[in-house]
Image: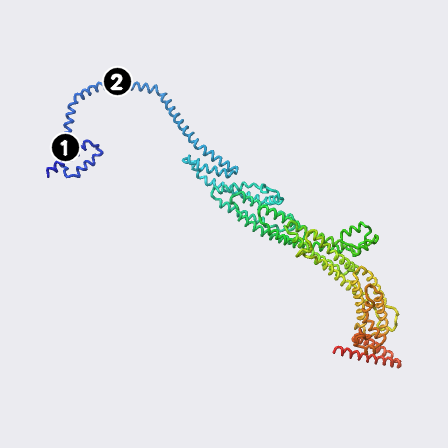
């Protein structure tokens, strides 16, 4: 067993030795390590020593074999050394000569070397410059574009420079500077383009008026007045830079601010039409620009934004118009304003903006227009009525007659037959007022034009406004004239005649309105004209004023009455004041020939009743404490004069003795006292057919007491005549008896 192991170890050591002999010394480590890892280290070293001795013997044998050849080689080498020394000397000499001779060549070669080096450097520089030149050219182009405000191309150039050219030369310091400068350039482009946008916004703010004026003239291409390129450039630039949303928000914010400024009207806008025109032009100009921006950019503004702005503009515009139009008192200005609003609305409607609210507001302004018209026509009517002479219009020729009939619808066969010169029954204010009513209707019609109203609506508007003109404006004007302090009876009579003819003309006004609106009066809901009522009311007021005026005139005459209530003499004629009063009444009622019969009769009856009442008051007034039967006789003459006037028929149409009944109370009272018919009065009192039915016992007692006082006073003065005193005493007793009976009648009546 031990022998077998010894053989294996010997074989292994042999393998290792062969490996050592054949292996590179750098790789011998692992081989030696295997020796040291084994347990036969000593034996291996012995074998290694043995192997080394074997190789030494082989080397020695080989050296002994080649030694003679070595000696021969040394001998030859020594011979060669001498020759080599000679050769060296020759070479040295040659080299010295060559160095001397080639010094200039070396210098030339050195120069050539430097030239070649420079050439290579130049070539390399040219190559590098050729690489850098496009970068520099692009950068120069960028600066030129920015200098000439071509910002969008500049931004494109900057993009090419950054992504295409600069990466090729990024290792140069100037490229690093450029790269660092690119964000600043972008920011500069943004700022400059934003500055251009601000200039654009300021420009369109200033020129909105001109843009709107062009658009309002219905001239297409109003937007061509504006260069929108700054907006487009700035939008593109911000889009490329990824800041489109920022740009959109800024643009909309600034335009909202401008909208608020545009929609703020000047404080004196209502003074002239130009103020309104400039206001509308600016608004139209603003929305023309926004509409163009909406249709030429993708999303810079959208429909919702435009609609929001328009809603704001509409509400503020309507509010401003309501406020400022309310200050306007000139109907012509209101009419011009209406036409301007219609043009404003139609213009914006062309651009797609809803304008129904503007037309609704025009209906409000229509009411204001009607009010201004009414105020204007109030002045017109006042001037007509103040300047009228309140006399029938004289005509001297057929031409004048036809001209007047053409102005006012009047037909009178009898008047046509009369020769010239002749007179119309009415004064000049009749045709003037009639024609001014027609002018008012025309003025109302003008406002309704272009409002997109139906014929029925126009007709209704005109009729309602005309009714206001008749029932309020004209009626007030007539009433003011009628109530004037200095108006005379002649004027009042003429006003009654005039209003009668104007009342008859109302049907022609109805026809006039029908002709211009083409809406028949029979149409359902058609408003009727109230002119008839207006003129009737004016006529009634004039009639009442005539009655009042007559009574005032009568009172003025009665103030001249100077009765001597204590007289015993009789003049046998009526008082002068009463004669004058009757003459005045006769002349006055002669003027009433053209009045309607009822008016003249009522005026005459009213005057007689007032005269009778006033005379009764004179007779019974408390200040007259006493009166004589003689004074009563004189007073009776005046009453008879009044009765004679009543019987004479100062106004036709009264039945027999009807007018005399105005004086019946006076007549019965005077007859009772003059005839001293107390027995009949007292006996028949209370009977329906009694002779003194109109005599009130209170009135009789008052007058009787005045006479009684006078008789008692006279009796005291004449007490020297006994017989006279007896007659007076008897009459006084009768008076006392009658007075007592009258008091009894009064007491029984009251109970």
Labels 1 and 2 touching (C-beta < 8 A): no
Q: Nearer the viewer, residue 627 or 299?
A: 299
Mark yes or no: residue 97 visible: yes
Helix, strand or loop at label 1? It is helix
Q: Tell me the residue that label 1 is attached to.
A: 49
Q: How many marks?
A: 2
Between disc 1 and disc 2, the foreground one is 1
Determine the residue positioned at 72% across, 53% down: 436
Q: Is residue 117 above or below residue 401?
A: above
Residue 52, horizontal then vertical, whole percent: 15, 31
Determine the residue positioned at 25% across, 19% down: 85
Q: Tell me the residue that label 2 is attached to.
A: 86
Q: Nearer the viewer, residue 77 or 263?
A: 263
Residue 71, horizontal then vertical, whole percent: 18, 21
Residue 489, horizontal then vertical, whole percent: 79, 61
Q: Is residue 466 left or right of residue 280?
A: right
Q: Is residue 585 above or below residue 698?
A: above
Q: Is residue 348 left or right of residue 664?
A: left
Q: Nearer the viewer, residue 641 or 446?
A: 446
Q: Is residue 679 above or below residue 401?
A: below
Q: Nearer the viewer, residue 98 or 224?
A: 224
Label 1: how many residues lie within 10 Å, few (<14), some (14-19) or many (20+)? Answer: few
Quadrant in the picture for residue 553? bottom right
Mark yes or no: residue 699 visible: no
- Which image quadrant: the C terminus? bottom right
What number is the disc on residue 10?
A: none
Q: Earlier in the sequence, mark 1 or mark 2?
A: 1
Query: How far, Cα to Cα, is label 1 from label 2?
Result: 51 Å
Residue 1, horizontal then vertical, whole percent: 10, 39
């Amino acid at each position: 067993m031990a022998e077998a192991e010894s053989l294996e170890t010997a074989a292994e050591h042999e393998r290792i030795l062969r490996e050592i002999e054949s292996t590179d010394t750098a790789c011998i480590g692992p081989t030696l390590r295997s020796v040291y890892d084994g347990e036969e280290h000593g034996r291996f070293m012995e074998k290694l020593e043995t192997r080394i001795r074997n190789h030494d013997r082989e080397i020695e044998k080989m050296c002994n074999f080649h030694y003679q050849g070595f000696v021969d080689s040394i001998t030859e080498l020594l011979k060669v050394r001498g020759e080599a020394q000679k050769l060296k000397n020759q070479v040295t000499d040659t080299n010295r000569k060559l160095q001397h001779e080639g010094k200039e060549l070396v210098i030339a070669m050195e120069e050539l070397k430097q030239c070649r080096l420079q050439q290579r450097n130049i070539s390399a520089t040219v190559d590098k410059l050729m690489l850098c030149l496009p970068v520099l050219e692009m950068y120069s182009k960028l600066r030129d574009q920015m200098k000439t405000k071509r910002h969008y191309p500049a931004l494109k150039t900057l993009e090419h420079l950054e992504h295409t050219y600069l990466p090729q030369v990024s290792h140069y310091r100037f490229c690093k500077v450029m790269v660092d400068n690119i964000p600043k350039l972008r920011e500069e482009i943004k700022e400059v383009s934003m500055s251009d946008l601000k200039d654009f916004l300021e420009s369109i703010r200033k020129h909105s008026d001109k843009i709107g004026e062009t658009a309002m003239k219905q001239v297409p291409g109003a937007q061509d007045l504006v260069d929108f390129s700054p907006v487009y450039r700035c939008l593109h630039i911000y889009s490329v830079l990824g800041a489109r949303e920022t740009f959109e928000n800024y643009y909309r914010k600034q335009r909202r601010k401008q909208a608020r400024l545009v929609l703020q009207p000047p404080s004196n806008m209502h003074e002239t039409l130009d103020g309104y025109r400039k206001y509308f032009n600016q608004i139209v100009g603003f929305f023309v620009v926004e509409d163009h921006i909406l249709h030429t950019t993708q999303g810079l503004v959208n429909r919702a934004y435009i609609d929001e702005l328009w809603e704001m503009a509409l509400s503020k515009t309507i509010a401003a118009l309501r406020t400022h139009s309310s200050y306007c008192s000139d109907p012509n200005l209101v009419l011009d304003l209406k036409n301007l609003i219609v043009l404003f609305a139609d213009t914006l409607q062309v651009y797609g903006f809803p304008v129904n609210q503007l037309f609704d507001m025009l209906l409000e302004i229509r009411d204001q227009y009607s009010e201004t018209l009414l105020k204007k026509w109030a002045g017109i009517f006042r001037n007509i009525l103040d300047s009228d002479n309140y006399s029938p219009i004289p005509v001297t020729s057929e031409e004048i007659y036809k001209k007047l009939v053409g102005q006012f619808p009047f037909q009178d066969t009898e008047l046509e037959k009369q020769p010239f010169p002749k007179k119309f029954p009415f004064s000049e204010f009749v045709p003037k007022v009639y024609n001014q009513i027609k002018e008012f209707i025309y003025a109302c019609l003008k406002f309704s034009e272009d409002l997109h109203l139906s014929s029925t609506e126009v007709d209704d508007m005109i009729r309602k406004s005309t009714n206001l003109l008749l029932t309020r404006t004209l009626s007030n004007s007539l009433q003011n004239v009628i109530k004037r302090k200095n108006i005379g009876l002649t004027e009042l009579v003429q006003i009654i005649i005039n209003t009668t003819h104007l009342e008859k003309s109302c049907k022609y006004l109805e026809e006039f309105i029908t002709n211009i609106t083409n809406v028949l009066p029979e149409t359902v809901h058609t408003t009727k004209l109230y002119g008839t009522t207006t003129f009737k009311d004016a006529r009634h007021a004039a009639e009442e004023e005539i009655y009042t005026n007559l009574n005032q005139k009568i009172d003025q005459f009665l103030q001249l009455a100077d009765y001597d209530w204590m007289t015993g003499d009789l003049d046998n004629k009526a008082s002068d004041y009463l004669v004058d009063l009757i003459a005045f009444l006769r002349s006055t009622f002669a003027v009433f020939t053209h009045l309607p019969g009822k008016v003249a009769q009522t005026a005459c009856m009213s005057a007689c009743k007032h005269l009778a009442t006033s005379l009764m008051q004179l007779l019974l007034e408390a200040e007259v404490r006493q009166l004589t039967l003689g004074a009563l006789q004189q007073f009776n003459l005046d009453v008879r004069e009044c009765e004679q006037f009543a019987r004479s028929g100062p106004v036709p149409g009264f039945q027999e003795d009807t007018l005399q009944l105005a004086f019946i109370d006076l007549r019965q009272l005077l007859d009772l006292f003059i005839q001293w018919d107390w027995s009949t009065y007292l006996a028949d009192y209370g009977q329906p057919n009694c002779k003194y039915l109109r005599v009130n016992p209170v009135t009789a007692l008052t007058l009787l007491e005045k006479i009684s006082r006078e008789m008692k006073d006279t009796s005291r003065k004449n007490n020297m005549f006994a017989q006279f005193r007896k007659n007076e005493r008897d009459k006084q007793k009768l008076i006392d008896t009658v007075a007592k009976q009258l008091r009894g009648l009064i007491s029984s009546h009251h109970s």
